[in-house]
Amino acid sequence: MIPSYSIQSFEEKFLSKQKASLEDTTIIEIAKQVINDIRENGDKALSKYVEQFDNYVPIDFEVSNKEREQAWDEVDPDTITSLKLAADNIRDFHKQQLSSSRFMNVGEEVVSGQLFRPIERVGIYVPGGTACYPSSVLMNAIPAVLAGVEEVIMVTPARNGENIAPILSVAADIAGVSKILKIGGIQAIAALAYGTETISNVDKIVGPGNAYVAAAKSLVYGDVGIDMIAGPSEVAIIADQTANPIYIAADLIAQAEHDENARAFLFSTSDQLIKETKMELERQCSNLPRREIAEKALKNKSSCVLVSDITQAFELSNRLAPEHLEVQVESPLNYLGKVKNAGSVFLGNYTPEALGDYFAGPNHVLPTSGTARFSSGLSVDDFIKKTTFLYYSQQALDDAAQHVVNIATEEQLEGHARAVQKRLNK
Ligand SMILES: NC(=O)c1ccc[n+]([C@@H]2O[C@H](COP(=O)([O-])OP(=O)(O)OC[C@H]3O[C@@H](n4cnc5c(N)ncnc54)[C@H](O)[C@@H]3O)[C@@H](O)[C@H]2O)c1
Ligand SMILES: N[C@H](CO)Cc1c[nH]c[nH+]1
Ligand SMILES: [Zn+2]
């Protein structure tokens, strides 16, 4: 079901046309209209769109404390243990990203540095259209809480009427989410960005979602911060003849089952491995609950490419800049230096992407559609503002004055020059 491409046809189909910006004008138009309506008409418009797009009439947008408490009784205790362990790993990994305010220059005459301050109010989007993602609750909220964000407000659509899945609420408690709102899609992004009578607006919105969510995030950007415009999930696997086709097929499927637009690629030096992986894909898809979604993604959005050597595989992968890169070759750690562009890297036969999706510690909210060329996955930094500060004594200003005046004069900004000259110690 997954097609094979020559290097040239792979370049034509996947590298030259790779684009992260949104092109579906219909979705953008719908998003504009919904956002404007909610901006003008608040809760009334919000309720209307929840009913229209998610088929339920909300009585209250917020999940109550009672509902949050009850959720703990409704989730399997073993799953709660797993979520807590995953949260510990994610916390430990992200803790190491923390840094604090610092002085760069501390002298008698000049003091300078950077203040690190958390963003005050953050909205996290947890997708809920076709699947339920407690792992995304942990990945979005834990770095925000570690950074010191005062209020973390989670939004997610209530799929079966008026309640969200109890496991999402439990994950939210474990991660330290302040408030859960059962709204999703464009309407949730609009409510977070501009506020309504019952919902206070936030300073930044993070988290993945479908094309409607991505369009809405791109439209509110500027009025609020956003983390990224996330496209469909992706994996690229680089494999040599030592790799196991059973594992490779499983990992391609794991990504393809997310979305019919998900992309899964195999770059291999072994024709035999490619053939065996294709047979294995047929076998493993045959009893997959999300078979239809995975098969569409594999058939229409994915490919296998036979490469001449591992260096060529890395060249293609670096140009693709995949969200996830798996390296299933002999001595995989030796190849880390060859990675230039990728959201997150998984090394060796026993490090499936699924391990990182759920449990190991690194974040799973990652740049897609080639944007790993210039951006990074979600981290504590996404929730921190860095403000520089500066102190000059009168003597230090006297010493620097002529240089400021020289440059200000070149820029023909006399006011700037005078702001310094007026302070000179004559
Ligand atoms: N990068 C990551 O970390 C990560 C993690 C999990 C999921 N994902 C991705 O997130 C996406 C989740 O998408 P999803 O659809 O399951 O959930 P979603 O929550 O992003 O979208 C569901 C919402 O879309 C809105 N919607 C659907 N059809 C609409 C229409 N015709 N008009 C207006 N609004 C409409 C509805 O309001 C609905 O609540 C997938 O692409 C998945 O691969 C990414
Ligand atoms: N693979 C997704 C990011 O592309 C993350 C995820 C969540 N749950 C399972 N997987
Ligand atoms: Zn996944």
Image (cartoon, grey):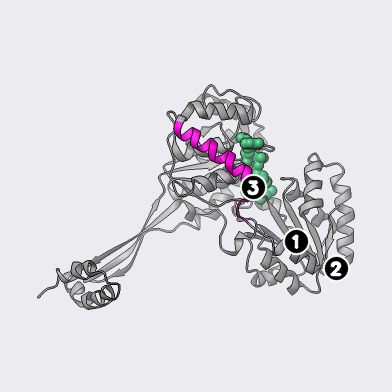
Name, please, the residue furthest toward the left: 426
Residue 234 horizontal/vertical position (percent): 70, 54
The picture quadrant where one finds residue 245 is: bottom right
Label 1, secondary structure: give it.
Answer: helix
Q: Is residue 237 left or right of residue 91?
A: right
Number of callouts: 3
Residue drawn at x 77%, y 55% is: 302
Label 3, secondary structure: give it.
Answer: loop
Q: Which residues are magenta?
A: 20-40
Q: Is residue 113 above or below residue 193?
A: below
Reading the image, the residue beneath label 1 is 13
Front: mark 3 or 2: 3
Q: Is residue 204 left or right of residue 53?
A: left
Magenta-highlighted stretch: main secondary structure?
Answer: helix
Find the distance from the CA under tag 1 to the CA under tag 3: 19 Å
Does the magenta-highlighted stretch encompass residue 213?
no
Of the two numbered discs 2 and 1 on the same chain, state the one appearing first in sequence.
1
Reading the image, the residue beneath label 3 is 24
Label 3 environment density (alpha carbons within 10 Å; few <14, some 14–19, many ≥20): few
Residue 129 horizontal/vertical position (percent): 66, 36
Does the magenta-highlighted stretch encompass residue 22?
yes
The picture quadrant where one finds residue 164 is: top right
> The C terminus lies in which quarter of the figure?
bottom left
User: Is the C-beta of the residue carrying label 1 under 8 Å from the nearest atom of ligand 1?
Assistant: no
Q: Using the image as rendered, state which of residue 70 and residue 126 is in the foreground.
A: 126
Residue drawn at x 58%, y 22% is: 57
Residue 328 in sight here: no
Residue 360 horizontal/vertical position (percent): 63, 52
Reading the image, the residue beneath label 2 is 270
